[in-house]
Image (cartoon, helix red, strand yellow):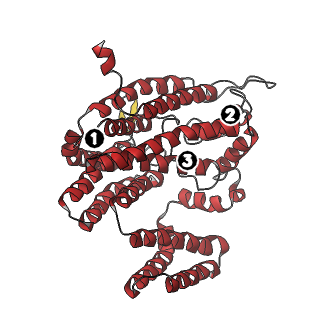
Amino acid sequence: MRFIWFLFPPGDRWILLSWVLLCLISLAVLWSVTEPIQGPYDELDPVVAKGVFYRQAFWMMISFGALLLASRVPLRYLDNVAMPLFLFSLLLLVLILLIGPRIGGARRWLVIGPIHLQPSELAKVTFILVTANILGRSVEEGRGMMAAMGSFLVMAVPMVLVLREPDLGTSLVFLAVWVGMVFWYGFPGILLLGAGSAVFSAVIMFYSESVAEEALPWGLYILLILVVLYFIRLSILSKVVLLAINVGFGIGIPFFWEKLKGYQQERILTFFDPSRDAFGSGYQAIQSKVAIGSGGLFGTHYLKGTQKGLAFLPERHTDFIFSVVGEELGFFGATALLGLFLVILLRGIDHAATARRPFGRFVAVGVVTYFTFHVVVNVAITTGLLPVTGLPLPLISYGGSNLLVSSLLLGLLLNVSSRTFEN
């Protein structure tokens, strides 16, 4: 009896239930994409092999073990080994760049027989742990902003290594998680404002340079910044720095654009105008929106999605699996799926706010930010609100590495929730 109880993870039952339901939904959708289309059409080959379903089921069993382990390891132990684990993950990232096999034009995978693992996924976990270690110790020792800046340097290393693979979508995860954790830490709002406005400046400059082909949109944005800076209450130095950051990021965009791969440039350009390459780089975005739109409120019903069944929708078992959910289960089914993620996020924020140990607080914030970024970006991609970057939907998309890491992170969140009052 005690052994059975040990196999039941401790902590927040709502988070655990959400994990179970999301895994079941993933299996149901993967079964659907590997089934021939049903209905008035001739039976067609689903293209996606049934082995995808069985491999995902196998990885779910492994992932449950990872979740259980992460939920029971003492947080003090994780705090102490965070840096060695992070350095080990960096070593794997370097090895991938040096000796990793090139698959699909990128070096992202560690191949061990039939198993393909992504070291960048492991790096996400160790990065959250080591950043929680740095920020947590800073809170206890009162080191202030130096720790936040140090954590930025820690973030930059895996981000650059992953960007070299190249994997733009995954590299941005490190930046997003760092922003979430330092925001919780108490990073000055003026710096976050500067970072956010700089991103807007870069995007508008890109639009002016590559889409509109005139400088007017960016010029109007800089004029708006000047007006805002005139009215807000900041020191002269802060205003000058904010303006310089916006101008610098805007001017730097053409140089950054030249460094991107050809396919990355085409994806971004197609985001602004999918019809420019409707049967090439814009095909995924167009078919994804068609699939979601055809689902309506209640969907075409399970196993009867035509975009999925007729193989119109590419990557329907990985990055675009949310499109299958929208088509077959409709608006209400997709909303219910996102509702399960919302439960995890809200419960995670609650545990971050109530945990006594700083390390546990920052781990919870890191996990919440990770899931928020992944879910928001993946849904935005499938609905055409962002360019295609190849970011999976956690716990739903096919893939052992991401499933294992997402389960590990939820295990850490369960761990924090079970030790809320632990000093």
Mark 3: few/some/many CA within 10 Å (<14, 14-19, 20+): many
Q: Say if residue 148 shows up in the picture.
A: yes
Left-right relation of 44 to 80: right
Q: Which residue sits at x=27%, y=67%?
A: 145
Is residue 200 positioned above or below 93 on the image?
A: below
Percent coordinates x, y for residue 27 in the rendering: 54, 26
Q: Earlier in the sequence, mark 1 or mark 2?
A: 2
Residue 378, numbered circle: 3
Q: CA distance from mark 1 to mark 3?
A: 35 Å
Q: Nearer the viewer, residue 284 or 76?
A: 76
Percent coordinates x, y for residue 108 in the rendering: 40, 45
Helix or strand or loop: what does disc 3 sit on?
A: helix
Q: Earlier in the sequence, mark 1 or mark 3?
A: 3
Is residue 206 positioned above or below 9 on the image?
A: below
Q: CA distance from mark 1 to mark 2?
A: 41 Å
Percent coordinates x, y for residue 388 in the rendering: 57, 52
Q: Amino acid at mark 3?
A: Asn
Return the residue at label 1: 421
What residue occupies the far top of the structure in this picture? Answer: 1
Q: Say if residue 95 shows up in the picture.
A: no
Q: Which residue sits at x=40%, y=54%?
A: 177
